[in-house]
Image (tube, rainbow, N blue to C red):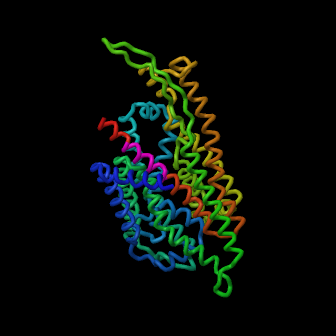
Amino acid sequence: MNVDIRGMIETLRRIWRTPDLRADILFVITMLVIFRILAHVPIPGVDQTNLRAFFESNQFLGLINIFSGGGMENFSIVALGVAPYITSSIIFQLLAMVVPKLEELAKEGEYGRAKINQYTRWLTVPLAMLQAVGLITLLRQSSAGLPILPHNLDTWTYATIVLTMAAGTILLMWIGELISERKIGNGISLLIFAGIVAGLPGTVQRTWLLLSGPNGGVDITQLVNLGVFAVIAVITIVGVVFITEAQRKVPVSYAKRVRGNRMYGGVDTYLPLRVNQAGVIPIIFAISVILFPPLVAQFFTGASTAWIAGVASWFIRIFQNQTFYAISYFVLVFIFTYFYTAVVFQPQQIAENLQKQGGFIPGIRPGVPTADYLNYTINRIIFAGALFLGVIAVLPLAVQRATGISTLAVGGTSLLIVVSVVIETIQQIQAQLVMRDYEEI
């Protein structure tokens, strides 16, 4: 244990002694602080007391609040968070798999990715405005007993609120991209992470209030339930770390080549295939998608046509059913793990690069057979990773249903994101240190 602590201290010293890496980390921290300041700048005219009471009574909005980075709970200028940008990213990643022009653009390397990112930003603007209108409508319809926004908003005030919220999302999108450029973690994930961490004290406080007995003491039954959840939380953390760090090492050999009077190659190494290539993205995508149908249904509950209002109410009821929600959550995490792996892992490109560098997998012919072998191998690995990640995702929901502590479902989802983002960020910082060690040699 002492060796590990000394190693951590030495790593921190190396980071601090590296000027550019130290500057990058301080920049990221500064951007996150700015984000948290913006999350506490409320839009004028909002009743903050009624807003907090409404959020505490609605678990569905609690999940949406996670992806706003905590800004929605204050109805701040960044209340929408990065959710519209995430939705836009999902749309274009799906389109890139079915639209030939976008598929060709995605294969054009850095230029293609830059163009698709540009299209993603453009689509984020109308999506942010639509989501702002949706959120205002949701709050005005669902909070009749707790008036949060004035029901007689004039057109100018309404448009100002919508434009302000959309501008807040664009600002966060820009901050997220600035963070990603520093290669100290994914900017969007870090913004969500910062909001979750900032909301942890409030979650702990609400959970403690639920544990209070009728005489002001502690309810022993609820305390035992909390202990069970704490054990499950530790198992979840260990599971996420295990599945994130696990990898399959595919052996790779490089043929000997003679250039002039020197011989190159003849090295045996390996190609690491991570069990979870997608990181925390499947969880973020899954929750973004699963929250969309009930959010849209909220707009039609007051429709004049009876069958439309009935269908909208049915959608809201079925998504409030914990069993249906857990099954949908599991299936979406499973599917998005495969989907995002297909986006980030390109067997054909890896096979071509190996062939150009004189590398080959022993027993496998270069070129197409190598790509087929990598595709077959990664599909087997990802099946285990997707299944395990899906189980871990719904585990807190199952414990919440067994214990009856309503704050645990949100806390479990937050835990998954926090652990995954921390691991991803640490890995990127370590990669930066290794790269600088090579540059010094």
- Count numbered badges in the picture: 0
Front residue of 2 and 192: 2
The answer to whether one can see residue 305 in this image is: no
User: Where residue 372 appears, x then y in whole percent?
Assistant: 57, 24
> Furthest residue to the left?
19
Q: Quadrant of the C terminus?
A: top left
Judge whether 419 appears above or below 164 on screen.
Answer: above
Q: Main secondary structure of the magenta part?
A: helix
Q: Which quarter of the picture shows residue 43?
A: bottom left
Q: Residue 317: x, y in percent?
A: 68, 63
- Front residue of this view, candidates 431 and 406: 431
Give the residue displayed 37% in from the left and 54% down from the top.
Answer: 12
Residue 432 screen position, x and y as percent: 37, 44
From the top left corner, tell me how far across and down residue 29 is, in percent: 36, 59
Residue 39 lies in the magenta stretch? no
Residue at the spot x=38%, y=57% of the render?
172
Which residue shows up at 47% across the image and 48% down it?
424
Image height of 262 relative to 137, above or below: above
State left or right for residue 153 relative to residue 290. left
Q: Left or right? Give the position of 293 relative to 17.
A: right
- First to last magenta residue range: 421-433
Residue 370's place in the image compared with 89, above or below, is above
> Foreground: 256 or 155?
256
Q: Looking at the image, can residue 47 be seen?
A: yes
> Which is nearer the eye, 256 or 337?
256
Q: Residue furthest bottom?
A: 215
Q: Residue at x 40, y 54 (%)?
A: 125
